[in-house]
Image (cartoon, rainbow, N blue to C red):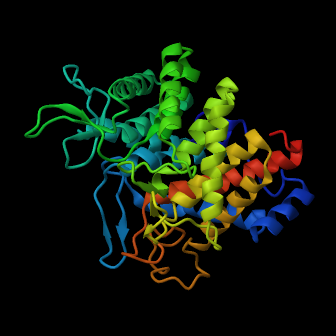
Amino acid sequence: MYSIISPKDWGLSAASSQSTPTDAAADFERRLGHPIELVASRCAHALEEWLPRHFDEESGSFYGFYDPVHQRLEPPQLVNLIAPWLTLVGYDRTGNANLLKMASRAAEWLHASGMVIHHPMSMAMGGVLEPGAPEAWTKYSAEYVILNLGLYARTGENHFFERALQSGRFLIQAARHGFAVKYIVSGRLRESWDHHGWQAFGRAIEALLCLYEETGDEVWREYAFRFGEHALSIQKPDGGFYLINGEYYNTDLAADPIRGLTFLYEESSDRRFLHSATRFADWHLDRQQDDGSWQMTIDTDGNVVCPTVGPGDVPNIAIALLRLHRATGDDRYLQSALSACAYSLSVQITPESDYKYRDDAAMLWGFWSWIPFYDYTVSADQATHHVRGLFFLMDYLRAVAANGSKV
């Protein structure tokens, strides 16, 4: 129940206009401003029409971003850590084996790409490298665990399980070395753990709890809680987590702390973790903009560093708020998630929108990477967060309608 890939992982049934009670569907439309049929249709277009155009059949991997100005697809890279989650969601909802195969091929491409360290003599075995840099990152390795466990759960193929274990061991070593953000594997300096960069304790907690859930091995649970204790020690008095060098908040790193700390509370009933999660969620509620989004980067003094919005981060935060709503019953978190998902729908490129490049087949039904527009790009990992967020919202609201506040 700790995986973050699909609503099915949380025990939620897929919502549709037929399966959702009429009064609940009306409430959904009132809250979100769109009927459930329209939201489901938009998600299906993104999954079934847009996403395949961004998959390279020859290499078996997802391209990087698409630039409509020059009509250029970036070569495959770490987008393949996240984009396969969307095909797994689609497989869960439709049973389409081709979607499962697409996710498997992307994971195989990653394994063979040279970006995942699997040489047995490496002290960073299981680490996932930043493209073009000799750095294996904790946050990427946690995502690799989640992807491979997701594939193992759906295919039963043991090599996916072994790869998840491998990268889980990397997370343990990161924790042992002061919760390091990365491992420097070469260069002028000797190999070493490094604390400069993006702290990703939330993703590590999620990955480690998934490993514990799959194996029953207490070591994974122990290290998840070690990351959680570390989180409690670095939360700022205003409730925020400033996870870039201890100075900057960034929306890319915002959803996982809320989810991870909520998971630790659910696992232990230790209210310190719930208190921490609600403080950070309340920090977001105080800063949510009128359109439902959050500004990308803020420093510890409250100064906005970058007022641009990363649209894909917004529905990912919404997913975390839904889990917190389930743990607390506090309707403020559900309302915030609804606003965030309404924003998500507003940045999808549809035939009816007046967005530039909507006539480009590689753009239609995708979601913008930046608002306000920076380079007019779209990418598969961004779309993954949007469509997952909308699916989670639809399925969660259906469960609320069926079961009341007990979801």
Number of marks in picture? 0
Residue at the far left in the pictured view: 188
43 relative to 253, above or below: below
Between residues 342 and 72, which one lies in front from this camera angle?
342
40 relative to 14, above or below: below
Between residues 160 and 385, which one lies in front from this camera angle?
385
Quarter of the image for the N terminus: give it: top right
Give me the residue at 74% from left, 39% from top.
327
Coordinates of residue 153 in the picture (x, y in percent) = 55, 28
Give me the residue at 46% from left, 77% from top.
372
Left-right relation of 233 to 105: right
Left-right relation of 364 to 185: right
Coordinates of residue 43 in the picture (x, y in percent) = 62, 60
127 relative to 268, above or below: below
Left-right relation of 193 to 360: left
Coordinates of residue 244 in the picture (x, y in percent) = 38, 51
Quarter of the image for the C terminus: give it: top right
Left-right relation of 123 to 237: left
Residue at the far bottom in the pictured view: 354
Judge whether residue 97 can be spotted in this image: yes
Between residues 20 and 297, which one lies in front from this camera angle?
297
Give me the residue at 36% from left, 37% from top.
138
Q: Quadrant of residue 176?
A: top left
Judge whether residue 151 can be spotted in this image: no
Give me the residue at 89% from left, 54% from top.
21
Coordinates of residue 318 in the picture (x, y in percent) = 63, 54
Between residues 93 and 315, which one lies in front from this camera angle?
315
